Amino acid sequence: MKKLLAVLITLFVVALSALVVYNFIIVPYQKDMDRVAPDSSALDEKKQDDQKDQIDQEKVYLNKIFTISDKEVIGATISEDKNHVTYYQKSTGFVRQARLDGSGLETISSFAIDGLNSVAWSSDKSKVLCSKINNEGKEQYIYDYSISKASPIESDLRSVVFSKNGQKIAYNYINVMEGMSNISVADSTGENWKTVLDVRINNPIIQWVDNYKLAIYGLPSFEDDSSILIVDTGDSQLERILSGNHGLSTIFSPDGNKLLYNSVDSDGEDLRIAFFDRKSKAKKEIGIKTFIEKCVWSKNNKDVYCAVPERLPSGDLPDVFYKKTTQTKDYFVKINAETGNETVIIPKIASLNVDAREMFLSTTEDYLYFVNYVDGRLYGVDL
C-alpha cells in the first residue's frame, strides 16, 4: 500500500512539473517565436506585397518611355523650331515629325527616296547630308532646303560632316590612283575647299571639336593602338591626345573642352569608359561599362546621358559592337563628368527590350531620344 501511494505521489509531482514547464516556459517561448517568425501565410502575403510594389514601381519607369515613330527611322533630330522631333522614314524617305512628347505624328514631306542609307543635318536644319544605295553603288549629296536644291558629292569624298555652325563641311579626300589621302574643309556647298592635313589613316573618323578644329582618329578596333589628332583648320597646327589606347572612340562636350572616350585592352576585353579634360589633362574613369555611341552630352558640358548594357557582347570589343550583329539590353543613367557620380534614370527592367543608340536631347533637356536597334524605331524618355 505504501509503495502504491509513493508511485501516485511521484506521478502527481511529474504531472505538476510538466504543467508548470508548459505554462511558464513553453507557452511564452512559443509566443516569442510567433512574433519573431510569422507563419508561412504571412510570409507569402509579404512576398506578394513586395512583388506588387516592384511591379508598380517598374510601371512608373516604363511610363516614362514613349514610342514616336511607327516604322524604322534615319536621321532623327530636333526640328528648326525646337518644338518637334523630325526624322526620315527609312522605307520611303518621307520626312515626318512629332511634338516633343511624341504626339501629333505627321508627314511633312512625301518625296520618296529609295535606298536611303544615312542622314546628317546641319545645326540650323537648313541642309541635310544624305547617302543612298542604288544599282551603281553609293550616292551622296547635300540637300539645301532653303533653295530646294541637291548638290552631288563626289565619290572621292568620304566621312563628310557638317561644322557645328553648319557653314562648312570636313571630309576625307581619297585619290586611289595617286595614292593620296587627306582631310579637307570646304563651304557647305562644297566650294572653296582647302586641304588641312595629309593622312595615312584608312576610313578616318572626323568630328568637329568647335567651328575651327577637327578631331581625327581611325576606326575603333582592339587590334589598333591609336590616338586622337586635333587639327586647326586655319593653320593646320596639331595636338595629339590619348595616345596608346586600343579600341579608341570619343564624343566631345559641346564646348570642346572635355571628352568621353572608350578603350579596351589588346585582347578586346576590359571595356573602359572615362572622361578627359583637354585643359588639365585629367582623366576620370567611371564604373559603368558602355559604348560611346550610347551616350550624349548635356549642353551644360558637365553631364552625360548613357544607355548601359546589362551585359556586354562577348569577345573582340568594340569590333563586334560596330558589326551590328549583336544587340544589348539597356538601362539609362546620367553621369556627372566632374564627380563621376551616376544617377539612374531608367533601371534594369526585365520587360524592357531596348538597344539604344543615336541619342539626342530636346533643347530644354526635358526629353531624351534614341533609336532602338531592336526594331529601328524612334523612342523618347521623359526626364
Image: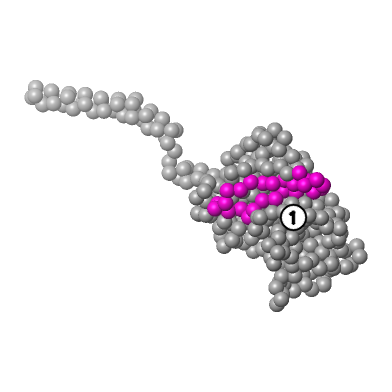
Q: How far across and down, in percent of the image, does residue 268 sit?
A: 52, 51
- In this picture, residue 172 sits left or right of residue 34: right
- In this picture, residue 288 sits left or right of residue 9: right
| Quarter of the figure with residue 138 | bottom right
378 or 257, nearer to the observer: 257
Q: Is residue 62 visible?
A: no
Examine the rendered structure and indicate whether residue 119 appears above or below residue 301: below
Residue located 80% across and 58% down the image: 121
- Which quadrant of the rendered structure holds the N terminus? top left
In the rendered image, residue 219 lying in the magenta stretch gets the answer yes
46 or 303, nearer to the observer: 303
22 or 137, nearer to the observer: 137
Report the number of numbered marks. Answer: 1
Dot 1 alpha-carbon crowd within 10 angstroms: few under 14, some 14 to 19, many 20 or more: many
The residue furthest right is: 147
Q: How far across and down, in percent of the image, does residue 246 sit?
A: 57, 48
Q: Is residue 47 visible?
A: yes
137 or 100, nearer to the observer: 137
Q: How far across and down, in percent of the image, does residue 170 sit?
A: 78, 55
Q: Amino acid at mark 1?
A: Ile
Residue located 58% across and 53% down the image: 221
Secondary structure of the residue carrying tag 1 is: strand
The residue furthest front is: 178
Residue located 10% across and 26% down the image: 4
In the rendered image, residue 104 lying in the magenta stretch gets the answer no
Residue of label 1: 183
| Quarter of the figure with residue 176 | bottom right
Magenta region: 209-237
